[in-house]
Image (spheres, grey):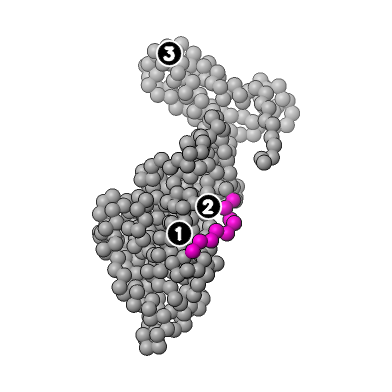
Amino acid sequence: MKDARSMIRFRGALGGELAARLDLPDTPPLAYALFAHCFTCSKDTLAAARISTALTGHGLGVLRFDFTGLGGSEGDFANTNFSSNVADLVAAAGWLRQLHQAPKILVGHSLGGAAVLAAAGEIPEATAVATIGAPYEPAHVRHLLTGAVPEIEAAGEAEVELAGRRFRIKKQFLDDIARRGGQDAIARLRKALLVFHSPRDTTVSIDNAAQIFMAAKHPKSFVSLDNADHLLTHRRDAEYVASVLAAWASRYVGAPESDGKPHAAEPGAVTVSETHEGKFTQAISAGAHRLRADEPASFGGSDTGPSPYELLLAALGACTSMTLRMYADQKKWPLSRVSVRLTHNKVHAADCMDCETREGRIDRIEREIELAGELDESQRARLLEIANKCPVHRTLHSEVWIPTRLAG
């Protein structure tokens, strides 16, 4: 992922500057997503950060920002309400539209989910909307203020403690969420909808997900988050949401809009970059393809993708299978299927009778090839010989020169 940590600021609905962050993949984004955080949260919550960085690993650009009066944004939170949050989202989409590309994906967490549902109609370029633990109606947050509601109604405002912090809530906030129903906005959505919710969410019950899903028209999907908590405090839950979201959204985002500049990747070039999701997690771009690499938990990784050695084995296995397929097709042999199983180990050089190296340890790759089809023994024996002629096999056995330099 590109380093996009420099502060971005744009004008919000109430006139103040909003603090934002744009996370970008190493290659031109397939599309842009706009992320709305939970009530009284910020763009830097664990869920927002982890989901955004994971989405960049799938080739998406993600803008996340602090609503007016929260995080690094200007303004007085007491003067905001649900409607101003929706307007802030529309302003954020406008900033993306002007400087990059309008968001095709809207993602909202908790009350941010209700906000993206309400804002979607004002962002025509958006084709897909995803909610995470979202309430069916904005008025759901009233229960978080229960003890202070009488004082707010009587005095016009009150200090309320939310998530360990003090906020001033005015009566206009209560009046606004009472006016803003969710059903009409959801019914008019006319965009693909994905609803994430945990059946064990104690902040926003899963009944809300059912109401959102029933009010929406197709295409719509629901994904259960099983044991996840409302704030997705466990990394694996946020990463799961991101991976499912990216796969789902790929159906609706289409090809990225061209800005007239050549973006084609150099043929044969592969880019590997840290995603910052875990200690070792890597995003791999190979042409138009996106992969991931990681280390297993036993090595301190997050196990979100194959290890480097597993990718090496995959390259050899794929090359072996492709080479055998090409040869069999040329010979018109009845090879119906090839399967290659590989393992890698470090062994003592002295144990290898055919190796030139006699001291220390060497790499041992075992390759087992399964050939299906009505092949005779001579054909099977010949295919086994051909396996050693695959280009990656030859590369591993030849002298390899790897000149390395610093970029820039």
State the image coordinates of residue 391 (x, y, percent, origin top left): 56, 22
Q: Residue at x 43, y 13 (%)?
A: 330
Mark number, residue 92: 1
The local crowd at label 2, few if under 14, some if 14 to 19, many if 20 or more residues have their Cα within 10 Å, is: many
Q: Is residue 389 magenta?
A: no
Q: Amino acid at mark 3?
A: Gln
Identify the residue position indicated by label 3 in the image.
330
Q: Which sits in the foreground, 278 or 356?
A: 278
The image position of residue 201, as x and y in percent, is: 39, 65
Quadrant of the image occupied by residue 360:
top right
Does residue 145 appear in the picture of this structure?
Answer: yes
Stretch in magenta: 3-11
The residue type indicated by label 2 comes to Asp
Q: Residues within 10 Å of mark 1 (few under 14, many from 20)?
A: many
Residue at image location 72% in from the left, 25% down from the top: 357
Q: Is residue 6 magenta?
A: yes
Q: Quadrant of the C terminus?
A: top right
Q: Secondary structure at mark 2?
A: strand
Q: Is residue 68 above or below residue 272?
A: below
Q: Secondary structure at mark 1?
A: helix
Rendered residue at 49%/58% (across/down): 64
**Rendered location of residue 349, percent (x, y):** 69, 28
* Nearer to us in this view, 12 or 176: 12
N-term-proximal mark, 3 vs 1: 1
Quarter of the rendering containing residue 110: bottom left
Q: Residue furthest bottom?
A: 154
For marks 2 and 3 on the same chain, the one whose residue lies earlier in the sequence: 2
Mark 2 sits on what residue?
A: 23
